[in-house]
Amino acid sequence: MADSEYAPPKVWTWNKANGGRFANINRPIAGPTHGKDLPVGRHPLQLHSLATPNGVKVTVLLEELLALGHHGAEYDAWLIRIGDGDQFGSGFVAANPNSKIPALIDRGGPTPVRVFESGAILLYLAEKFGAFLPPGGPGRAECLSWLFWQMGSAPYLGGGFGHFYAYAPSKFEYPIDRFAMEVKRQLDVLDRRLAETEYLAGSDYTIADIAVWPWYGGLVNGWLYEAAEFLSVQDYGNLRRWADTIGERPAVRRGRMVNRIFGEPSSQLHERHDATDFETKTQDKLALPT
């Protein structure tokens, strides 16, 4: 069925009821809505996040760094419930003025350092610990190119396709068709690259893979928007091979659990403050949100 014609007004006005599932948290202004300080744990790295694809990027990298023996990468992961508007608390807005997860505060020096935007956090941590990022030359350029490719592409997958296909209160052909076309083009970009090399930046696993995997690996594995069949993801064999290889890494499996509040209770670790939390999860940590 063709979409009904819409004539944009001369001046846009905010309709608070518009926006579907996320109407209660979407707004055209920035800044906090309430006062709330962020908690502080015992580790220098304090992460405030939720296990969306952008949040998973950071917890995967932290778990990978710890697996390599970088003890300074120990971290506290605090849960930000975006559906409840936690991202608009004054403490979180101070950590990320854009009010989006994730936000990292590094308290390891004399002055706390805030880092926001998931790609910036990955780059900050990779440089801090000298891991998962080539030190220079063509390898570094390739890695950063794919990292920023993901940061520029994900809005088409998440805010575009994901919104209109899965979350919009009404379904219309044009936006779904437009964004599905772009997402399939992106899948083809990745599949062609991964026909040439094992990982996105070359033979080594890097922050480029860690950035892309929660989004596009999740999509081809059927974790995002229940859209795998709609997008014919079985056609992208190289991408599926790469997604499966990364998904089998123990650190990736752990990172995907952190700040997770959906799915099977056994897959959730609402907050993480020590490596032993994965083995000693208590019922309060596993309890589904009310």
Image (cartoon, helix red, strand yellow):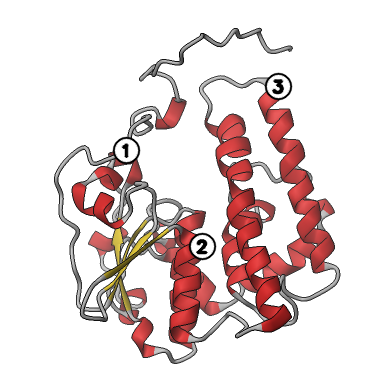
Residue with the mark numbered 2: 119
CA gap between label 3 and label 1 equals: 31 Å
| Amino acid type of the residue tagged 3 in the rendering | Glu
| Amino acid type of the residue tagged 1 in the rendering | Ala
Secondary structure of the residue carrying tag 1 is loop
Please indicate, yes or no, whether residue 139 appears anywhere in the rendered image.
Answer: yes
In the rendered image, residue 80, in percent from the top left (x then y), is placed at: 30, 52
Q: Please give the name of the residue rendered at 63% of the width and 69% of the height, measured from the top-left corner.
A: 144
Nearer-the-camera pick, 27 or 236: 27
Q: Nearer the viewer, mark 2 or mark 3?
A: 2
Q: Please give the name of the residue rendered at 37% of the width and 47% of the height, measured from the top-left corner.
A: 98
Res. 7 image quadrant: top right
Secondary structure of the residue carrying tag 2 is helix
Give the side of residue 259 with respect to residue 110, left or right.
right
Q: For the C terminus, which image quadrant?
A: top left
Residue with the mark numbered 1: 30
Q: Are marks 2 and 1 in contact (CB under 8 Å)?
A: no
| Total tally of numbered discs in the picture | 3
CA gap between label 2 and label 3 equals: 32 Å
Q: Please give the name of the residue rendered at 66% of the width and 7% of the height, measured from the top-left corner.
A: 5
Q: Earlier in the sequence, mark 2 or mark 3?
A: 2
User: Label 2: how many residues lie within 10 Å, few (<14), some (14-19) or many (20+)?
Assistant: many
CA gap between label 2 and label 1 equals: 21 Å
In the rendered image, residue 212, in percent from the top left (x then y), is placed at: 62, 61
Please indicate, yes or no, whether residue 290 appears anywhere in the rendered image.
Answer: no
| Amino acid type of the residue tagged 2 in the rendering | Gly
Secondary structure of the residue carrying tag 3 is helix
Q: Are marks 2 and 3 in contact (CB under 8 Å)?
A: no
Residue with the mark numbered 3: 173
* Residue 180 position (above or below residue 248): above
